[in-house]
Image (cartoon, rainbow, N blue to C red):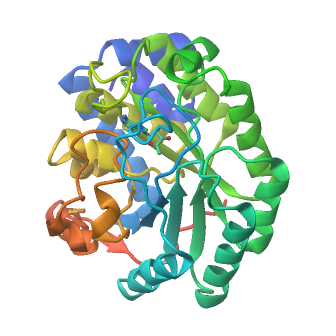
Amino acid sequence: MNKIIAKLERQHNLEKSEFRWLLENNTPELRRELSGRAQKVAHETFGKGVYIRGLIEFSNYCKNNCYYCGIRGSNNQVNRYRLTETEILDCCQNGYELGFRTFVLQGGEDPGFSDEQMVKLIEKIRRAYHDCAITLSLGERPKAVYEAFFAAGANRYLLRHETASNEHYQKLHPLELSLKNRKQCLVELKKIGFQVGTGFMVGSPHQTIDNLVEDLVFIKTLDPQMIGIGPFIPHHQTPYKNAKAGTLEETLLLISILRLLLPKALIPATTALGTINPDGRELGIRAGANVVMPNLSPVAVRKDYSLYDNKICTGDEAAECRGCLSKRMESIGYKILTHRGDYPEE
Ligand code: 5AD
Ligand code: FES
């Protein structure tokens, strides 16, 4: 066995030069060996089970202007929508009946959906669904707001760091956004008691191998419960419309590395991975991921939550992502698990 892979599996960590070596030698043979080890490690904790999270994309308004993102505030060609509280609760009810025990409320940083409204919504979901986890993905907020969300009953928070290099961060975001603040939010969320998820896009514009090495080091240090990565995919109404997409191969390699780096982490095979390759999510699971996040948003709004071009699950055929993903997971010998799927306790 490759010595670096053996060391990563044994020590759950590597020197930067060793991470770099893996990223620079991304051959089918290396991936085969890495994903074999990563799968074995995932099976030790999760068996051949895959957790599902019901994703509710409740607002595509956003005050930010990330250069890569299709729903950036200054894209005036987006058909903006904001679900009402009743519509969101209907999504949860529908999800609950389909067996979901985690709801992920994701939206742009939408000033039109106030913190008070959010708190009320979380309280209602908490009261109606005692046995469910509530995950938020609402970007950067003041600490007091995170505390209020937690007190209202939210359990988890997803906030990708996007890149652990300051210089690279500024190539992806306008000046008013800073990596320092992003990292501070992550630390605060963790301290408050949220299970925290972070992550990055693979192959984002200007990303270097050294940036990816820094991402791995940052993630190991933060030690999050969840790690979401997916390929960057250009959106035609953004400044990076002509940038190249990230690759399937690099994303799979990184999923396997992350699985060996944080053996118990919850790692989704993302929609972006399923978008660059029709079997992307299945391949992600086989590379060491253990979560899928079917879309629960009303079909009518799905095409408007378009962070990147050609996003899957936006057409009429996608009314039932839950069934589609069950079949897909079964086709590779895995089974969807319908309990909450919290981070495994030590
Ligand atoms: N391609 C791939 N992923 C994207 N995201 C935003 N825009 C894109 C894109 N063009 C990711 C970001 C964000 C998450 C919600 O979606 O990493 O954190
Ligand atoms: Fe959405 Fe297959 S998972 S259509």
Quadrant location of the N terminus in the rendered image: top left
140 relative position to 173: left or right: right
In this rendering, the count of numbered labels is 0
Please, is residue 229 above or below residue 246 in the view?
below
Whether residue 210 can be seen here: yes
219 relative position to 275: left or right: right
Quadrant location of the C terminus in the rendered image: bottom right
Q: Nearer the viewer, residue 204 or 30?
A: 204
Residue drawn at x 49%, y 30% is 8
Residue drawn at x 75%, y 68% is 116
Which residue ends up furthest to the right in the rendered image? 144
Q: Nearer the viewer, residue 338 or 345?
A: 338
Residue drawn at x 19%, y 26% is 28
> Where does ligand 2 appear, by image quarter?
bottom left
Q: Nearer the viewer, residue 338 or 306?
A: 306
Query: Which percent across, then down, holds residue 223?
Result: 65, 41
| Image quadrant assignment for residue 29 | top left
Residue drawn at x 63%, y 55% is 157
Query: Which percent across, then down, holds residue 132?
Result: 57, 79
Please, is residue 151 above or below residue 288 in the view?
below
Query: Which percent across, then down, holds residue 166?
Result: 63, 16
187 relative position to 223: left or right: right
Q: Nearer the viewer, residue 72 or 177?
A: 72
Query: Which percent across, then down, holds residue 42?
Result: 41, 52
284 relative position to 179: left or right: left
Please, is residue 299 above or below residue 215 in the view?
below
